Amino acid sequence: MRSMRLVRNFTEAIARFLLSAIFLVTSINKMFHWDDFERILGSIFNDWLTYGILPDSLQDAFLSLAHWAPALLIVSTAFEFFGALLILLGWNERLGATLLILLLIPTTFLFHPFWLLEGTERELATPMFLKNLSIIGALIFIALNGTRSRERAVAFSP
């Protein structure tokens, strides 16, 4: 029985690492290349203006969002880093999953609008969109259920 618990704990720790790794790496990368990510985020908002599908009121909102790119980047990076850290460490992983869900939903639609693209761009955006939906599904599962190992506070403790 004890060996099964050790296997389960180890497997859960690996699963938390695998799920959180992309968010930790990306958030740390943002911290070291902040100006580049500010430009990318501003560019995404401007791209949405060029798609020509937004009503005037939403175009104004996207123009405003482009000006708020630095503040949005701070909030999104904090959600990304701390959400991933909570999941990795197994500390309040439900909150961590919720933070990442709140990050990923708008990110998925803003950065991967495959329905507006054509050709190679569409071929690249579609799997990225679906990958994010898969990750959101895993995060919803964690937000609803946690990792079910309540007897320990740290990911790698026996």
Image (cartoon, helix red, strand yellow):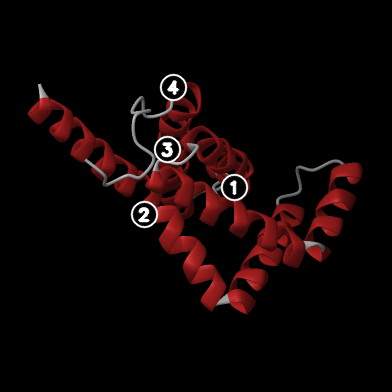
Q: Is residue 120 visible?
A: no
Which one is earlier in the sequence, the residue at label 2 or at label 1? Answer: 2
Q: Quadrant of the C terminus?
A: top left
Q: In the picture, residue 7 is in which quadrant? A: top left
Dot in front, 4 or 3: 4
Compared across the picture, whether 63 is left or right of 15 comes to: right
Q: Element at badge 2?
A: helix
* Front position among marks 2 and 1: 2
Which residue is disc 1 drawn over?
Answer: 107
Distance of mark 3 from mark 1, alpha carbons?
12 Å
Q: Is residue 151 left or right of residue 99?
A: left
- The Cα atoms of the two marked residues, 2 and 3, are separated by 12 Å
Q: Nearer the viewer, residue 115 or 66?
A: 66
Q: Which mark is residue 32?
A: none
Tell me the number on the disc at residue 135. 3
Q: Position of residue 102 (x, y in %)?
A: 62, 39
Residue at which label 4 appears: 145
Residue 49 position in % (x across, y down): 77, 55
Query: Mark 4 Cα within 10 Å, few/some/many (few <14, many 20+)?
Result: few
Q: Residue at x 37, y 29 (%)?
A: 147
Pointer 3 or 1: first along the chain: 1
- Where 104 sits versus 136, above or below? below
For mark 4, give the secondary structure.
helix
Where is the N terminus found, in terms of image quarters?
top left
Q: Is residue 90 above or below residue 94?
A: below
Q: Quadrant of residue 115?
A: top right
Amino acid type at image mark 4: Asn
Residue located beneath label 2 in the image:
21
| 29 lies above or below 82 | below
Distance between the alpha carbons at the discs numbered 4 and 2: 20 Å
The three-letter code of the residue at mark 1 reads Thr
Query: Which residue is pictured at 80% across the width and 62% down the height?
Result: 68
